Amino acid sequence: MIPRMTALLVHGVPDTTSLWTPLRALLTDFEIEVAALPGFGCELPTDFGGNKDDYAQWLIDRIEAIGTPVDLVAHDWGAILAQRVAQIRPDLLSSLAFGSGPLDETYVWHDTAQAWQTPEVGEAVMEGILAMSLEDRALILEAGGSPPALAREQAKSWDSRMSASILGLYRSVIDPESIWPQLNSPVGCPTLVLWGADDIHAPPEFGRRVATRINAELLVFDDCAHWWPWARAQETSEALRRLWGEI
């Protein structure tokens, strides 16, 4: 039997690698690695700029360090970065599964993102979040659609370094022309788009749009908000096994 490629899981905002805990528990028979985005529960590399291109290059370097093409699985900002990798380094991908991170010319950033992008307003929002108790911070995250257990993980991990990283990342995409072009054709490997039907941050229409443009399989989870990797880990694991040719 030909061994599977390494699967690399890439989280988004405001998450850490803990996002993937339930899914990893269901994929223990695979070679799984998790990518911790710089500043999100981990240190920042020396001289790391923190804009979208810095994060995309960091992800490319991370994949290259594995030494073989990977089965890339990505959520939220991780999904945006994964789509960029598919554009400029498709040779690094054995398969691609992503969702809830629109790279779409019609997408308008949600209200919280726009607050983060606004000078002084973003800093004030972050100060308010860091001043909250962990319990109140988790409640705010839960109100935005995060499952309760995940909201607690997010609340514990959200520190001043993450706040600064979020602001730097989002402020590198303030203007529509500052974001990368959308994917408009198949990426050259088996591809799966996953989305929550009740996602208020990135409505599922954007999942349908990109799946149509790139001729990818689409899986929309009913009664699911933004964080499908945690809330729908079982269904996601089964879909990934199908994508990877296991069932």
Image (cartoon, helix red, strand yellow):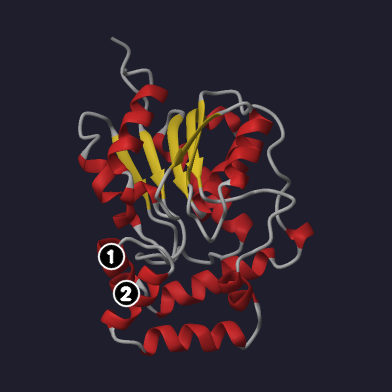
| Image x and y of residue 209, in percent | 65, 39
Q: Is residue 215 left or right of residue 193?
A: right
**Direction right: furthest residue:** 177
Left or right of residue 200, residue 234 in this image: left
User: Is disc 2 surrounded by few (<14), some (14 to 19) or many (20+) residues within 10 Å?
Assistant: many
Sequence-first tag of 1 and 2:
2
Q: Residue at x 57, y 53 (%)?
A: 203
Amino acid type indicated by mark 2: Ala
Q: Position of residue 66 (x, y in %)?
A: 40, 36
From this view, report whether residue 241 is shown above or below residue 60. Answer: above
Q: Which residue is mark 2?
A: 138
Q: At 70% across and 29% down in the image, what residue appears?
A: 185
Quadrant in which the N terminus is drawn: top left
Above or below: residue 141 compared with residue 245: below
Q: Is residue 235 above or below residue 3?
A: below
Picture quadrant where residue 45 is located: bottom left
Residue 67: percent from left, percent from top: 42, 32
Q: Which mark is residue 148?
A: 1
